[in-house]
């Protein structure tokens, strides 16, 4: 199908320039074919009325835990910091998540992302152990396929019990290194696609490089990734415990340990990096290592604020992640953009962040980090990953900067249509819309089933 979006209030396309305002977007063969004003429809094009809407590039979520979409607001973890929360929530529940529950959780998390304006999700999926089933991972790919979402599956792993007490308390038997690599190879050969507009990518992503894999295993993971052109991802310095453990176990700061096991570079990014000092920032910048900044989760768990303003000044690529909905209950990318815009002003003043800058963090920067440079911005030749936010509503009516209204006002947002690779996947024109009432009932039933498995 070919489409022509006509008459948008505004389009976020910096390449067009202020003297060439764009209102129309032509989509052909899954790509943006033309940007302009008053474009003449071709006979084979379906018209999309963009009046009352602003067009953004599809947002790119660089760190998520889709399995946590059914673990929101667990009472035991509501007021706990990271270490205790891990034991009370994800490590307690995830061994009981089977393929059916994983499918529901993944579909819920991806649907929440779609309805907030995301079109790409990097899911740090870590539900693997010695006797785990491949069907649990397959369920994530299936959910993404059904929703038409770009999925980067960051394949988690733990090859030792680790120093996080949650894993020990849950009695989880880790994978062996051979198991993890063999299973990753199976996923790579079955799902991974090359190219900068791929719909499916695999990433090598041990759950925590400080806690869940010994040095030689990390080197083996890095070698496997680079031999196959895969990127690398993990958690690092979310809280000071990472630094304490690196110093105690390896006699060096966590960032130096990462470098010693070949886990820094332009093909690597870490989630959180809240506890970065100037030495760590310098190494990240020098090596081209990126960050998935997850402000909502870091606030929710009391972890702190990642120093992304200093990182950006040093040249680090800043991207945004929702993180798991067990510590970021909104599950929304627009929430992350809005909070990122606001949060750093509390530390650095009103010039610390601009809305346009934060929108780039959440779109173009993320696409580049994931190796999806053919997406992430509204430019001719790029993939048609486009979100039409409907701002013809009372809460946006008083906004004097209509292009920025969704970001400035934050949730709730309303989307008229979202395209991924030129296909309408949400809102008007979507071929397979979700029956929200039935889907809600299915999720609620799934939560009941999970609770029964956990509590006997």
Image (cartoon, rainbow, N blue to C red):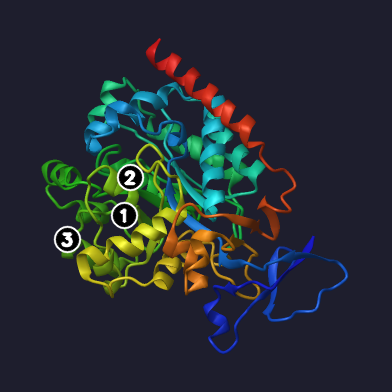
Please report the residue visible at 62 percent of the width from the left and 32 percent of the height from the top: 437
Residue behind mark 2:
218
Please report the residue visible at 24 percent of the width from the left and 62 percent of the height from the top: 307
Q: Quick one: label 3, few (<14), some, or many (20+) residues within 10 Å?
A: few
Q: Quadrant of the N terminus?
A: bottom right
Mark 1 lies on a secondary structure that is loop
Residue 57 picture location, percent across and down: 56, 65
Q: Quick one: label 2, few (<14), some, or many (20+) residues within 10 Å?
A: many
Q: Residue furthest top?
A: 456
Task: Tell me the CA gap for discs 2 and 1.
Answer: 8 Å
Mark 3 lies on a secondary structure that is loop
Front residue of 343/227: it is 343
Disc with the residue nearer the chain's start (3 vs 1): 1
Left or right: where 395 falls relative to 301: right
Disc with the residue nearer the chain's start (2 vs 1): 2
Disc with the residue nearer the chain's start (2 vs 3): 2
Please name which of the two marks, 3 or 1, marks the residue nearer to the observer: 3
Please report the residue visible at 61 percent of the width from the left and 66 percent of the height from the top: 53
Residue 357 picture location, percent across and down: 40, 71
Left or right: where 234 falls relative to 125: left
For residue 363, say whether it is visible: no
Residue behind mark 1:
262
Task: Tell me the CA gap for discs 2 and 3.
Answer: 23 Å
Q: Quick one: label 1, few (<14), some, or many (20+) residues within 10 Å?
A: some
Mark 2 lies on a secondary structure that is helix
Front residue of 174/123: it is 123
Residue behind mark 3:
277
Task: Tell me the CA gap for discs 3 and 1.
Answer: 20 Å
Which image quadrant is residue 353 in? bottom left
Front residue of 55/127: it is 55
């Amino acid at each position: 199908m070919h489409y022509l979006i006509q008459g948008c209030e505004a389009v976020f396309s910096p390449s067009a320039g202020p003297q060439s305002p764009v209102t129309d977007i032509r989509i052909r063969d899954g790509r943006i074919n033309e940007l302009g004003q008053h474009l003449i429809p071709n006979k084979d094009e379906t018209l999309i009325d963009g009046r009352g809407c602003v067009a953004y590039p599809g947002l790119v979520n660089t760190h998520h835990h889709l399995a946590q979409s059914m673990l929101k607001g667990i009472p035991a973890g509501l007021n706990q910091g990271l270490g205790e929360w891990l034991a009370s929530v994800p490590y307690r529940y995830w061994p009981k998540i089977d393929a059916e529950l994983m499918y529901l959780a993944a579909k819920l998390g991806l649907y929440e992302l779609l309805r907030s304006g995301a079109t790409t999700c990097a899911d740090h999926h870590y539900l693997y152990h010695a006797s785990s089933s491949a069907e649990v991972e397959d369920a994530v790919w299936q959910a993404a396929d059904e929703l038409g979402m770009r999925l980067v599956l960051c394949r988690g792993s733990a090859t030792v019990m680790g120093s996080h007490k949650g894993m020990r308390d849950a009695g989880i038997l880790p994978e062996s290194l051979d198991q993890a690599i063999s299973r990753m190879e199976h996923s790579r050969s079955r799902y991974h696609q090359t190219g900068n507009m791929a719909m499916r990518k695999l990433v090598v992503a041990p759950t925590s490089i400080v806690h869940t894999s010994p040095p030689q295993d990390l080197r083996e993971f890095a070698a496997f990734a680079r031999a196959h052109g895969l990127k690398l991802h993990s958690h690092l310095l979310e809280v000071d415990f990472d630094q304490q453990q690196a110093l105690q176990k390896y006699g060096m700061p966590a960032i130096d340990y990462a470098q010693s096991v070949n886990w820094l570079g332009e093909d690597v990014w870490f989630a959180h990096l809240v506890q970065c000092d100037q030495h760590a920032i310098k190494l990240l910048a020098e090596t081209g290592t990126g960050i998935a900044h997850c402000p909502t989760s870091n606030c929710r768990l009391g972890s702190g604020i990642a120093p992304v303003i200093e990182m950006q000044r040093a040249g680090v690529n800043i991207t945004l992640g929702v993180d798991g909905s067990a510590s970021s209950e909104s599950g929304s990318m627009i929430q992350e953009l809005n909070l990122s815009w606001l949060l750093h002003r509390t530390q650095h003043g009103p010039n610390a962040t601009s809305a346009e800058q934060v929108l780039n963090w959440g779109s173009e920067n993320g696409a580049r980090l994931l190796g999806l440079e053919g997406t992430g911005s509204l430019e001719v030749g790029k993939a048609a990953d486009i979100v039409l936010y409907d701002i013809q509503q009372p809460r946006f009516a008083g906004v004097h900067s209509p292009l920025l209204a969704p970001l400035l006002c934050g949730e709730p947002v309303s989307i008229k249509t979202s395209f991924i690779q030129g296909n309408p996947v949400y809102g008007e024109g979507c071929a397979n819309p979700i029956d929200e009432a039935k889907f809600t009932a299915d999720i609620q039933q799934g939560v009941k089933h999970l609770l029964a498995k956990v509590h006997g």
